[in-house]
Amino acid sequence: MYRLPNGQMRIEDFVLPFEGKLNPDNRWVKLSQLIPWEEIEKTYAQLFPSDTGTEAKPLRMALGSLLIKEKCGFSDRETVEQIKENPYLQFFIGLERY
């Protein structure tokens, strides 16, 4: 089972505590704008034709995490820790808030 996201996420919509804002010049923000997430999501969603079972994670989360892991040379566990600690990585994988 798979649900398509509601469209491309904008940097202005990412919520940081204490009303902070992400820097649009950050490398992860720039990279996120180069990837055609919505187009890839449509193809990815076709891999999950059933309406039953556990809902799959969004492609942006799955592929984004893999890109972070490979680009930075992290282990699986370190990738998770880095994402938990870094709002830019959270934005990159499609999370809406820190």
Image (cartoon, helix red, strand yellow):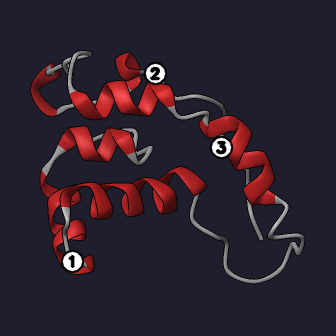
Count every numbered label the image shows and give the total. 3
* Residue at (23% x, 57% y) in the render: 83
Q: Are marks 3 and 2 in contact (CB under 8 Å)?
A: no
Residue type highlighted by circle 2: Arg
Q: Which residue is mark 1?
A: 75
Q: Which residue is mark 3?
A: 5
Question: Image check: 81 left or right of 52?
Answer: left
Distance, label 3 to label 2, CA atoms, is 13 Å
Badge 2 local density, few (<14 within 10 Å), some, or many (20+)?
Answer: few
In the rendered image, residue 81, in percent from the top left (x then y), is placed at 15, 67
Residue type highlighted by circle 1: Ser
Badge 1 local density, few (<14 within 10 Å), some, or many (20+)?
Answer: few
In the rendered image, residue 98, in percent from the top left (x then y), is placed at 24, 43
Residue type highlighted by circle 3: Pro
* Residue at (40% x, 39% y) in the render: 96
In the rendered image, residue 88, in percent from the top left (x then y), is placed at 23, 38
Which type of secondary structure does the marked residue at label 1 adopt?
loop
Q: Which mark is residue 10?
A: 2
Disc nearer the start of the sequence (3/2): 3
